[in-house]
Image (spheres, coloured by chain):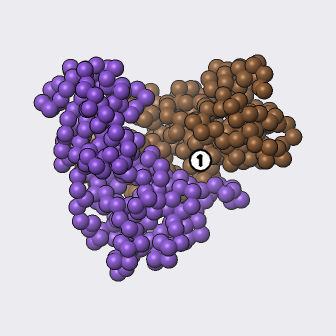
Chain colours: A brown, B purple
Amino acid sequence: MLPKSQLKLITSLAQKKYRKEHGLFIAEGFKTVTELMESRLKLQHLYISNPVHASLNKNHTLISEKDLKKISQLKTPAEILGIYHIPGSRPIETNALVIALDDVRDPGNLGTIIRLCDWFGVRDLVCSHNTVDCYNPKVVQATMGSLSRVNISYVNLSEFLQKNEDTSIIGTFMDGRNIYKEMLPTKGVLIMGNEANGIRDEIANLVDNKITIPRFGEKNVTESLNVATATAIILSEFRRASIEM
Amino acid sequence: MLPKSQLKLITSLAQKKYRKEHGLFIAEGFKTVTELMESRLKLQHLYISNPVHASLNKNHTLISEKDLKKISQLKTPAEILGIYHIPGSRPIETNALVIALDDVRDPGNLGTIIRLCDWFGVRDLVCSHNTVDCYNPKVVQATMGSLSRVNISYVNLSEFLQKNEDTSIIGTFMDGRNIYKEMLPTKGVLIMGNEANGIRDEIANLVDNKITIPRFGEKNVTESLNVATATAIILSEFRRASIEM
């Protein structure tokens, strides 16, 4: 049986303040855990409910399904739960394309954006302090292992942009210029805004180039694209433009 | 108080077989309900827990928050729940770009793809019978009202493609041709596959042009893009190509 103290520690990691306090986070499921194990991230301990996974790492404890269910954040626990050390951020390299998020709140959206950065070879993802924590269990789950391949930094976004004012700063707005007709740079900072409110005025004032994805369907509709799908389209456009140069 | 018979009917609509039996589905929240109300969809009845929404439609019942919670499919019920009639599908117009889904199972993915069709002016979305039902409450929620603007048909996908063999049939595969270097047609059927298994062999055999979104990050990674983000990128490429022609 899992000692109470461990149970308490692990379940506390669902909350950001305890993740910060302990410097630990949870990842679940075979694919995510094994991908993180092969990365620069350090495993603290592995909990498995099926002995078949014992060979994954010496540093493991076999526990009952019931105990795994207690520590799992998933509706359907997946036999494997790893506790990892939160890595320190490496310095941000602004001499490339950097993605910056201004208060993106939905864990699924952040997880998808981290996967997209990984796919499109974006090394640095910069998040405003009010962006959802990338070690939130739902974010970790949505990244499918990409988490270890992207350097994620939480910063005061306004200060970060001011410090990098010689860089091209691009933001997405409903009334921006048609992305298909813009010359996109191969480096710079691309800002994506909050799900409901977009980019804050304070940040918008620092943007050099406002872009948008034009709507092809009925025009008199207030709907906008979800921030994760918009990021997918814009990143694709940046990378396509870089091939053609 | 809500009569037991109504409570039973409404909660049964969480299941596909009862939606089919009654020809009804649920939509929740102010934005989704009002967008559907302005569409061709017919409201059967509206349930509200706050009298401020009474002016939306005469055909409403004011119920307690407790009762709304009972009939809601959301964790945090949103004061408004509408019951709508499931519309009949209109004939599929194959003289344009049509999206076809081969067993897409995740409600969030289908919801996102419906929004993308709406955004990019794709009139017809064709789904294999094993694709998640578009009137599933989670799909309806994820579409944010786009549901009424896209014509969704559930078909035997193999038969549908065989009947349209004079149309250009394009499929997405891990080993397809680089989408950024392909000439994309302005009309045809674009097939997106299942989250875990991609496009079935039976369907793959009917594809004329296999395409892929190239990976720019580390190459020796098994990861693929999520089907909804891949659809976003490919639809964007199709529409961009149509502008430039």
Where disc 1 sits, the SS reads: helix
Residue at left 47%, top 53%? B105
Specify the farthest residue to the front. Answer: B5
Q: Position of residue B61 (x, y in %)?
A: 19, 26
Q: Position of residue B129 (x, y in %)?
A: 40, 61
Residue B209 appears anywhere in the view = no
Residue B60: which quarter of the image? top left
Quadrant of the frame with the C terminus of chain B: bottom left
Which residue is the site of mark 1? A115
Residue B117: which quarter of the image? bottom left
How packed mark 1 is, by other alpha carbons closer than 10 Å (few <14, some 14-19, many 20 or more), is: many
Q: Is residue B138 left or right of residue B121?
A: right
Q: Chain of mark 1?
A: A
Note whether B52 is above or below B237 in the view shown: above
Residue A221: which quarter of the image? top left
Seen from the viewer's position, the closer of residues B226 and B200 is B200
Residue at left 40%, top 68%? B157
Q: Position of residue A245 (x, y in %)?
A: 54, 63
Residue at left 65%, top 32%? A69
Residue A53 appears anywhere in the view = yes
Q: Is residue B32 left or right of residue A16?
A: left
Seen from the viewer's position, the closer of residues B220 and A128 is B220
